[in-house]
Image (cartoon, rainbow, N blue to C red):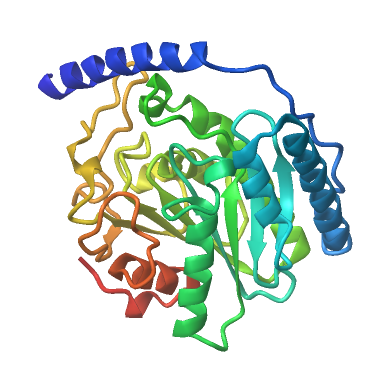
């Protein structure tokens, strides 16, 4: 009961913080994106073009209202031949970037991020776009001939770290259907590709909510890292045929999170505990935000999981 009381205390503090944050919000100046072509092999290039147009439209708005952070981020999105499957500038923003060739890939790794990810932080160290590119580079260095595509998926609205939402599963329940739709669309583009879901922090709650309804989609690997839990007690409760991995770096503060799931609060069993049933991989010694940092032990093992090279993954 001590851990439950601690969690309730934390929620009270975060609710107060969230109310202050909400009070400083501003009116929405960015418009909703237009309809996108349904994702398929035939429409993929049209989808890239439509999304690029939406990014350019949002950049024009950012310049008009002098939103410097958005100007910087969206200018980078439009450079160096980058390709996005979807984009929404409203709120903290959503963006789904493809790194590699989706049509020819034998394997597709989807990086599912946690709290505080946003458009303006997408390319910053420790966040999903930067991490997705680091994963792709590491995988290519490990297996130059492998045909891998990486998806940096900011396809839901992650909670803020200082908010009550970060301790409940509401944002994950909203995000899980979007993740399933993404996988279904990618499967229509490339029916032979196998999937790996690489789920960081609160993103592992999203993956936990999506896993039971993935159906026949070819998800071979699910890696939970820096995870506070999935709202389930065991890997069997996830209802997936995928090989479930779990890793936690020695410097990660999330080890102090109370592993409870009471009245909607908390995320249940610790994924790196023996009772959960995941295969533990060596995630090194870094902090919570450094699992996909170039040169890290965690990145090495996550790249091997993405490639489906399970026998080469260093166990914890």
Q: Residue at x 44, y 83 (%)?
A: 142
Is residue 220 visible in the rendered image? The answer is no
| Left or right: residue 149 compared with residue 167 | right
In x, y percent, where is residue 299?
Answer: 37, 67
Based on the displayed image, in which of its 4 quarters is residue 192 positioned?
Answer: bottom right
Q: Taking the image as drawn, is residue 78 in sight?
A: yes
The image position of residue 109, as x and y in percent, is 54, 63
Q: Quadrant of the C terminus?
A: bottom left
* Placement of 11 over or under 306, stated as above or below: above
x and y percentages locating residue 97 in the rendered image: 65, 56
* Quarter placement of the N terminus: top left
- Residue for point 24% across, 51% down: 272
Q: Where residue 236 sits: x, y (%)?
A: 36, 47
Find the residue positioned furthest to the bottom. Answer: 145
Q: In this orientation, which residue lies closer to the viewer: 27 or 166?
A: 27
Is 214 situated left or right of 126 in this image? right
Query: Can you name the residue that lies furthest to the left here?
Result: 2
Total marks drawn? Answer: 0
Q: Residue at x 43, y 23 (%)?
A: 165
At 37% from the left and 63% from the top, the residue drawn is 293
Left or right: where does residue 259 sit relative to residue 123? left
Quadrant position of residue 203 = top left
Foreground: 225 or 309?
A: 225
In the image, taking residue 2 as reference, residue 116 lies left or right, namely right
């Amino acid at each position: 009961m001590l851990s439950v009381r601690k969690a309730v205390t934390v929620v009270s503090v975060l609710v107060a913080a969230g109310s202050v944050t909400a009070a400083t919000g501003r009116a929405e100046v960015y418009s909703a994106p237009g309809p996108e072509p349904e994702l398929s092999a035939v429409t993929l290039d049209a989808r890239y073009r439509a999304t690029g147009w939406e990014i350019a439209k949002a950049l024009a708005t950012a310049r008009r209202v002098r939103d410097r952070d958005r100007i910087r981020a969206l200018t980078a999105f439009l450079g160096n031949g980058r390709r996005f499957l979807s984009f929404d500038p409203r709120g903290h923003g959503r963006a789904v970037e493809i790194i590699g060739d989706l049509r020819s890939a034998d394997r597709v790794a989807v990086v599912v991020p946690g709290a505080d990810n946003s458009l303006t932080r997408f390319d910053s160290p420790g966040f999903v776009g930067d991490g997705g590119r680091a994963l792709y580079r590491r995988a290519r260095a490990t297996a130059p001939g492998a045909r891998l595509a990486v998806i940096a998926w900011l396809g839901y609205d992650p909670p803020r770290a200082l908010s009550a939402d970060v301790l409940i599963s509401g944002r994950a329940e909203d995000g899980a259907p979007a993740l399933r739709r993404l996988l279904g669309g990618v499967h229509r583009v490339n029916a032979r590709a196998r999937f790996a879901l690489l789920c960081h922090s609160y993103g592992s709650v999203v993956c936990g909510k999506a896993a039971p309804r993935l159906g026949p989609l070819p998800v071979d690997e699910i890696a939970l890292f820096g995870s506070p839990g999935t709202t389930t007690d065991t890997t069997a409760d996830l209802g997936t045929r995928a090989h479930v991995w779990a890793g936690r770096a020695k410097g990660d503060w999330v080890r102090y999170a109370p592993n409870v799931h009471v009245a909607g609060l908390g995320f249940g069993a610790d994924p790196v505990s023996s009772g959960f049933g995941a295969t533990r991989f060596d995630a090194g010694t870094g902090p919570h935000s450094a699992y996909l940092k170039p040169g890290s032990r965690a990145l090495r093992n996550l790249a091997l999981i993405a490639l489906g090279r399970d026998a080469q993954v260093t166990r914890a």
